[in-house]
Structure formats: structure tokens, C-alpha cells
Image (cartoon, rainbow, N blue to C red):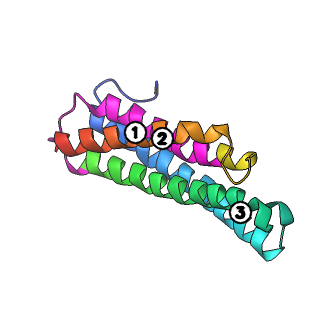
Amino acid sequence: MSHVPKHTPIQVVFASRHIRFGWWSLLVFLTLGLVLEVFHGFKIGFYLDVSNATRRLMWTLTHAHGALLGIIHIVFGLSLRATPEMNKSNIPLVSITLIGASVLLPGGFFLGGISFYAGDPGVGIAIAPLGAALLLVAVFLTARAN
């Protein structure tokens, strides 16, 4: 973030980062939701066939978790701006764990739906629990900092 003046408080820098990340995440995951609706509308077999129920569930979870995490980023950014007294020492750690959660949690669901076996998600699902753990760390650290 070389365009940020040196005297800018850490909360402002990270607030801007997460508000921007949140809005872009919303765009990506709401667009995915629209694509999934198109798959429904046009009765696309690789998505709607009964044999592909696992893919449908995994990709629906991708859309839902990704959109929710986008909103969480926006709320986190606004919280940083609204509570300047927040403990500053954990903000970089919260930031990286929240971004990691936003990639790994929906990413794991998406990868789990690409290829699956006998109704079980593919191996990509293995990264979703790591994303969930990162989300819990981010929320805990944020709650404790206020």
C-alpha cells in the first residue's frame, strides 16, 4: 500500500483494505449465485442431475459462505473506522486470518464440487475446515480487541 501516507493510522489502512476486499468478494460470489440460478433456469445437467447433487450443494455453499464473508469484511472495515480505541496490535493478524478464511472456506467448497466420488465431495473440501478455523480466530481476536 505505497499510496498511503506514512502518518495514516493502521485502522484506516486496514479498514480501507477490508471494505474494498468485501465489496469485490460480494461481486464475485453474488455473480456465482447468478450463474447457479442460470444453471437452474436452463436445466443444466452437470449441475441439476440427481447424480450431481453433491456439486450443487458444494457450489451453493461456496456462494453462501463467500457472500457472507464479503459482508463480514465490510463490517470489519467499518468497525475499524468506528472504534479507533480498538487494540491495534492484532489488526494485521485479524486481517490475514480473515482474508485466508475468505479464500479457503468458499474455495474448499468450490473445489469439493468440481469432482466428487459416490456422493462425497472431492479432496478440495479438505481446505474448508482450515478456512473455518481461520474465521474463528479472526472473530475471536476481533471480539477480544473491543
The residue nearer to you, when weighing 100 against 3, is 100
Q: Earlier in the sequence, mark 3 or mark 1?
A: 3
Question: Would you say the residues marked 2 and 3 are in contact, meaning their CB atoms lie under 8 Å apart?
Answer: no
Q: Which stretch did the figure color magenta?
A: 82-110
**Residue at 32% in and 52% down:** 78
Label 2 crowd (10 A; few <14 / some 14-19 / many >=20) = some
| Looking at the image, residue 82 lies above or below residue 135 | below
Label 2 or label 3, whichever comes before in sequence order: 3
Q: Which residue is mark 2?
A: 129
The residue under the point 56% across, 50% down is 24
Image height check: is 72 above or below 99? Answer: below
Q: Which residue is mark 3?
A: 53
Indicate left or right for 27 with 91 as reference: right
Does 77 sit left or right of 56 as displayed?
left
Cα distance between the residues tagged 2 and 1: 6 Å
> Is the residue under label 1 in contact with that under label 2 (CB below 8 Å)?
yes
Q: Quadrant of the C terminus?
A: top left
Main SS class of the magenta portion in the image: helix
- On the image, numbered disc 1 is attached to which residue? 133
Q: Position of residue 109 (x, y in %)?
A: 60, 48
The answer to whether residue 27 is visible is no
Whether residue 79 can be seen here? yes
Q: Secondary structure at mark 3?
A: helix
Closer to the eye: label 3 or 1:
3
**Alpha carbon of mark 3 to alpha carbon of mark 1: how far?**
26 Å
Membership of 89 in magenta stretch: yes
Magenta stretch: includes residue 90 = yes
Q: Indicate the secondary structure of the residue bearing disc 1.
A: helix
